Amino acid sequence: MKKLLFALFALAMIASLGCAVTDYPFITDDRGDYSGLIRTAHKAYIEPTSQVATIYPDGSDELFSMVLQNQYGDQTLYTFNNFDPTASVLFLDQTYCDWRYEGCEIVNAWNPRQNDEPFDYQFFPDCSGARSLSLLISQGSRLGECGDGLWADKQGLAGVFADLDTTTWRGGSAYVVPANAGNTTVTLNSMAGKAETLPLFGNFTGFITEDLNLAVPMTPNVRHELNFLRGWIAANGNQANVSVTYEGVSTELPVTFRPEGLGSNAGRF
C-alpha cells in the first residue's frame, strides 16, 4: 500500500498522472457454494489504491476507471474524468457504489481472458480529461470493485503515514509528502534494458488526506519533467518499467507513456 501510493505520487510529478487502467485481473468471488469467475452485469468502479487529483490553474482532474466483465472473464475497461472547474478537488464519492456514470469515456480497453495485449485501447480525445491522459497502467492485483466487499480499512491504513508531517488542507487534516532529488529517485528502465535516472527539478509537494486520497498541485517546474520524458520517449520508446525509491521505500511499475498527453500537460502552464 505504502509503496504503491508513493510510486503513484512520483508518477504524478513526472507525468501529471492522467492514468487509464488498460489491463486488470480477472474478477472472481467465493460465496456460498460458488467459487470462480463472476459476471458483473454492469460497469463496476475499480477501487483504487488511492484517489488521485492533479490541480491545474484551470481546474482539477481525477481520472477513474470502471470494469465490465462477462461470464467468461473477458473485460472491457473504461476511464472517465471527475473534473472540478473550481480546482477545490471534490473527490468522486463512491459511498453508494453508483456505477451509472453517464459521462464521456476517455478510454475503453478490451481485456480478453486469452491473447490479451495489456496496453491496447481506444482513445476519445474530445472527452473531459483526455488532455491529461499520460499513462497506461497494467494493474497486477485487485484491491476490489465497488460493491464487491473487498474494501480496504482506509482509516487503519492511514497509520503507515504516522511519520509524515500534517497540515490543514481543504478544511481537513492531510499528510504532507515532500519530494525532491534528496529523498526521491525515479529510474526509467527501457524495454531494451537501458536505465536512466529522471532528474527532479526543484521541489514537489503532495497532500494525502485521512481517506488516503492524493492531491498534487502541478507547479510550473513540472513541465521540465514532462519535457525530459518526451525526449526520453523519443530515444527509447514509450514503454518502461519505472523504479521509484522514496525515503528508502522502493517499488517498480510497468507503464506506457502517451507523448501526446505529456505534450498537452506541458502546455497547461
Image (cartoon, grey):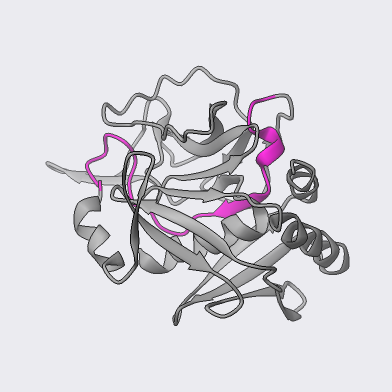
Residue at (47% x, 33% y) in the render: 88
Residue 227 image offset from top left, x and y in percent = 81, 59
Residue at (77% x, 62% y) in the render: 229
Magenta stretch: residue 13 in it? no
Q: How many marks?
A: 0
Whether residue 181 can be seen here: yes
Q: Is residue 29 left or right of residue 198?
A: left
Q: Which residue is situated farthest in the left direction here?
A: 32
State the predominant SS element of the stretch in magenta: loop
Q: Is residue 262 left or right of residue 66?
A: right
Vertical arrangement, residue 178 with respect to residue 151, above or below: below
Vertical arrangement, residue 81 with respect to residue 11, above or below: above
- Residue placed most toward the observer, 199 or 39: 199
Location of the C terminus by quadrant is top right
Whether residue 116 can be seen here: no
Residue 116 image offset from top left, x and y in percent = 61, 50
- Residue placed most toward the observer, 199 or 253: 199
Residue 48 image offset from top left, x and y in percent = 40, 47
- Residue placed most toward the observer, 181 or 75: 181
Residue at (71% x, 74% y) in the render: 199
Location of the N terminus by quadrant is bottom left
Q: Quadrant of residue 221?
A: bottom right
Which residues are drawn in magenta?
Answer: 127-151
Residue 42 image offset from top left, x and y in percent = 40, 25
